[in-house]
Image: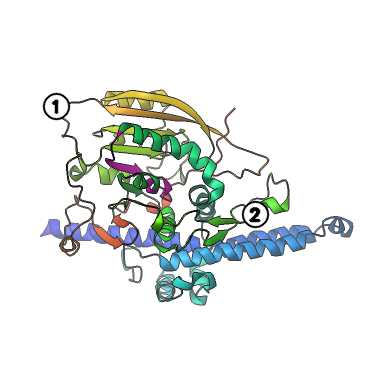
Amino acid sequence: MGDEAEDRHHIKEEEIMEIRSLRRIISAYLNYSDAAEADVKRYESSFKKLSCSHKALLSHLPSKFQKLRRCISINGNFIINMIQAFDPPVDMSRDIDFDEECNSVSGKEQSTFVESYRMAGSSNNIDDHKEAIPSPNMCNDSSLSLNVPLVDVDKVRCIIRYVLRDWAIEGRNERDECYKPILEELQRLFLPPRCLVPGAGLCRLALEISCLGFLCQGNEFSYYMIICSSFILNHTQAAGEWTIYPWIHNNSNFLSDDDQLQPVMFPDIRPASAGITEGFSMCGGDFVEVYSDVSQEGTWDAVVTCFFIDTGHNVVDSPVSRGRQIWINFGPLLYDFADPNGPDEMPVELSLDDVKRISFHYGFDLEMERTVETTYSINRRSMMQNKYFAAFWTMRKRPSRYDPPPALEKVCPLIWPDEYMNTPSPPFGNHRLLHFTNIWSYFWIAHRSHISQRRLHPNKKLLP
């Protein structure tokens, strides 16, 4: 009985951590417009301090500030619709009542958040989202907008830029540079097998792999990414349906104001009509924790990592380097975590030679390797263009009598029968699953390990 009580306590603690993490992320999204408006007010304040003669030379700036506000409003409208469409894996309306060590949300803030989230969830304007009006309770609620850390504000702005990279025509060059070599390598190596894509981000690469006929599952740790990718995949009705302004939050290196205020329409395709293969799915959770489970042994014939291996804490312990048949990797080694001073946040930072040496130790042979020059979520009209010289390789696992047999003929349990959804312990290790049936089969692996702290890959790597 003592063990059962301890398990229940542990589960409750994990659920509270999950709810708190999601509330923080949703608060960051809902704070987007207020944070951006604060920036515009600072620009206006600086302008007002100029002398009259200088103001006359820059008389166009007040008009630009109003244009920025319009862009912020359009971005905010997209975010509100995205949040209202989000179906979380935990009950966000529940009250959190836990010990002081685990609970940092005051009772007043907590009850206000619950009321606001219920108001957002009760909205019926998703099908008519171009005219969506954010809930006043949700958007004006001070408990959702106060004390949002700057790092969370930056993550939301990163997501807006990442939408361009994965889902806009303007991101096609980067996708061709990064994704096309991976897709060509998969086609060269396989008849369509089962392919796993950790660090799937906004899920365009996983979708493209699925469209080739592969039974593909993406895995993503960041709820910032998961909320946005779910909305694009499950709630977009047409190509070019949405407009965002990804460059308005930085004033550096623009040739003109028009370049900064350039709109981007997305998605460039309608995901539901893209030709995805049945069984396409998304798994939310920590890659190491989920895919080290014994139930995953022999399930995947290929693992594809793109801008991913430098985001983990310990590449030595990564399931990528253990137990897979083919590993295709593309990306740099930019070790830059959101909270390097936090507990257990600093990763083991290895050189490329060390990463490969560890892979060889775990039984991989290098079949192909080259360097690809590419960029990551850049503005091609900017005066500054940061570039990566990304490592691109294919490794194949050496046969071993200890390895499980190839999984090509196995039935991959991606679509759980309905009876599994109603059992307390679904057959996926010890992880709880929630099932969403839409364009993809959306699995949430609720491991709950400080999801909000997963850093987003920044675009600031300067190479000679």
Residue 110 visible in the current orientation: yes
From the viewer's perspective, tell me whether residue 383 is left or right of residue 356: right
Q: Residue at x 68, y 46 (%)?
A: 252
**x and y, in percent, of residue 419 in the image:** 15, 63
The image quadrant of residue 407 is: top left
User: Residue 104 in magenta?
Assistant: no
Identify the image quadrant of residue 462.
Answer: top right
Q: Residue furthest right?
A: 53
Q: Three-letter amino acid code at disc 1?
A: Arg
Magenta stretch: includes residue 201: yes
Q: Residue at x 45, y 46 (%)?
A: 455
Question: Under tag 1, what secondary structure?
Answer: loop
For the residue marked with disc 2, what is the amino acid? Answer: Gln
* Residue that badge 2 annotates: 262
| Quarter the C terminus occupies | top right
Horizontal side of residue 403 vs 53, given as left or right: left
Q: Is residue 61 left or right of residue 146?
A: right
Q: Which residue is disc 1 drawn over?
A: 401
Report the mark closest to the observer, 1 or 2: 2
Q: Residues within 10 Å of mark 2 (few under 14, many from 20)?
A: some
In the rendered image, residue 62, in percent from the top left (x then y), is placed at 76, 63
Residue 371 is labelled as none
Question: In the figure, 15 relative to 286: above or below?
Answer: below
Percent coordinates x, y for residue 307 in the rendering: 44, 39
> Can the viewer see residue 309 in this picture?
no
Could you tell me residue 145's position as x and y percent? 52, 66
Q: Is 166 drawn above or below residue 374 in the view shown?
A: below
- The range drawn in magenta is 190-207
